Amino acid sequence: MNLPKVLITGGAHRLGAALVRAFATKGWHVFLHYSTSRAAAEQLARSLTQDGYRVSCVQANLASDTERKTMMDKVYSQVDHLDCLINNASQFEADNADAFDVANAASQWSVNLMAPLDLTQMLATRNAKSGARASCVIHVLDQKVFNLNPDYFSYTVGKLALERTVALQAQALAPRVRVCGVAPGLMYLSG
């Protein structure tokens, strides 16, 4: 069976888990990425697999260039292309503009900005080499990019930069890759 294939980053919890369930139950082969939430990822995958759906777990620290590449190598060793990539994973740590830590900000930007850009580039390159049909990339942003407030400064800066790259990537990668962004509002209780 030739199912459409999707990689969902940060798929073990919250919105990511809801996306995994939605795509799996609609007949997609889902690659569920997790970083440190192995037990939750495997439990979700096992539950869906027992119901007859196709879910494969892949682990990577998205802050690491090497681990991102290794993850994509693993995915592409199982399939010849991805139909969709959902960049959902994020690092979300409280800080503010007048007292933020540069290393912490860089760590958040690595996951929230650089990882989605890098994964999108890898998808576009690999799918082009395989001659695959067009794909879609969805960057999960945050309503904060349209409703600015100064809390979670580094997180917000990273999401703002990612929001601006949606149009740039869409222009650069069309027509082979369609790049979209969604900015959900508050869905879960926040700290």
Image: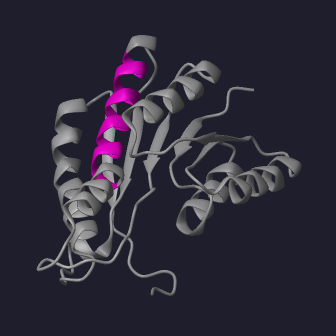
Q: Say whether residue 141 is left or right of residue 191.
A: left
Q: Is residue 65 visible?
A: yes
95 vs 27: above or below: below
Please tell me whether residue 53 is drawn above or below residue 125 in the rendered image: below
Give 39 or 11, whichever is nearer the viewer.
Answer: 39
The image shows a total of numbered marks equal to 0
Quarter containing the N terminus: top right
Classify residue 1 as left or right of residue 161. Answer: right
On the question of residue 82 being in view, the answer is: no
Quadrant where the image shows the C terminus: bottom left
Residue 127 magenta: yes
The kind of secondary structure the magenta stretch mainly shows is helix
Q: Position of residue 94 (x, y in %)?
A: 32, 77
Q: Position of residue 67 (x, y in %)?
A: 47, 34
Residue 77 at x, y percent in the picture? 60, 19
- Point 54% across, 66% down: residue: 15
Q: Nearer the viewer, residue 111 or 15?
A: 111
Left or right relative to 85: residue 109: left
Q: Residue at position x 42%, y 33% from top?
A: 135
Residue 42 shown in magenta: no
Query: Which stretch did the figure color magenta?
Result: 112-128
Residue nearer the viewer, 120 or 64? 64
Residue 143 picture location, percent across and down: 30, 75
The residue located at (24%, 61%) in the rendering is 105
